[in-house]
Image (cartoon, helix red, strand yellow):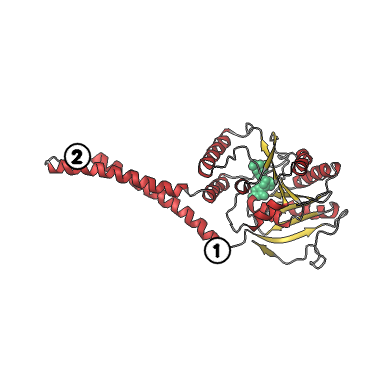
Amino acid sequence: MRLPATPLLSVVIPSYCEGSGVIETLDVVAGVLRKAAIPHELIVIDDGSTDDTWSFLENACATYPRLRAVRFSRNFGKEASIWAGLRHASGDAVLVMDADLQHPPGLIPEMYRIWREARVDVVEAVKTHRSREPLLNRLGARLFYTLMNRLSGFDLDRATDFKLLDRRAVDLLLHLEERNLFFRGIVAWMGFERAQVSFEVPERAHGRSKWTLVKLAGLFTRSITAFSTLPLQLITLAGVLFLLFSLILGTKVFAQWWMGEAVEGFTTVILLLEIIGSLLMLSLGILGTYLARIYEEVKRRPLYVEAAVLASEPSDRPPMVDPDEAPAGSRPPETRA
Ligand code: UDP
Ligand code: MG
């Protein structure tokens, strides 16, 4: 596909309770893009923030050209925000980045340049290391990425959501019918040619991380189940092992009975009951997790609900909003899959 002389870059910024920090980020990003003379549009998704993020965004629409702000009706999570951003983006390439300046905007011109020159579909920024994070987070992340790698075959250890995607990749993602998507995983799954730039993750510029243990655990099971069915096969494997074990033990018990020896081993019975009981529960849990995913998929509910969309006037390029679209901010709530 031939690119226009100055391809448009859409920058998608999911933000949840970032307050005035979102403006700080917009300032830095817009400044970098202007300096590098990259034609761009900015898309900020307010993921149902409970603070004043949205009022900051409303004001920003008056000052920033080509800014689109989308407000979710409630908190749908970062993955849904990324998806909404991809859907709203009209650029030849779409860049996704965090709102807390932990994804250095200074890297954007470099990523844009690599995309144009190397003609790759994905330019991803990977972190050099994760040493600044608390020990527990690092251990959790290690467990997750090792499991993910073993189960799905994708090495996501240093991957981040800071990625630039070519329009081809964005369109492919938007055509996927799945609900349970894990952005980092699905980008690797597409298998397109990827270029990498590395960066050191700076401290959060403002506010605190929005991840709670519950949210992380949710992401953990969601991503594993979305990319692998191996846990299901493990149940069968455990079943086979126990069957073999029970055959051996059964023969022994029967032989002892045959020879008239009293069957002893009350402790063994208790232990076996406990082991088998927990194994069964665990297996049911795994089955249930997959069942829940199937249930979510067949319901076909939208990934998020938009409560409002605001778009500022473009200054340098043709209008981004359809002329026959209702005036900014007055659109009725809409749902997008
Ligand atoms: N975020 C979001 N919805 C959420 C949680 C987070 O859109 O439910 C956004 C958040 O505003 C930020 C990005 O996702 O722009 C990364 O979040 P955070 O910095 O809290 O995560 P961390 O950097 O600790 O992984
Ligand atoms: Mg962060």
Badge 1 vs badge 2, beta-carbon distance below 8 Å: no
**For this rendering, which residue is in front, 288 or 174?**
174
Residue appearing at x 85%, y 44% in the figure: 37
The x, y position of residue 326, in whole percent, is: 79, 67
Find residue 332 and name its label. none
- Residue matched to label 1: 299
**Amino acid at circle 1:** Lys
The x, y position of residue 213, in whole percent, is: 56, 44
Above or below, 248 relative to 84: above
Mark 2: secondary structure: loop
Along the horizontal axis of the image, is 48 left or right of 153? right
The x, y position of residue 75, in whole percent, is: 64, 54
The x, y position of residue 96, in whole percent, is: 71, 47
- Residue matched to label 2: 264
**For this rendering, which residue is in front, 19 or 265?**
265
**For this rendering, which residue is in front, 116 or 2?**
2
Along the horizontal axis of the image, is 109 left or right of 124? right
Residue appearing at x 54%, y 40% in the figure: 149
Judged from this view, the residue extending furthest toward the front is 1
The quarter of the picture where residue 31 lies is top right
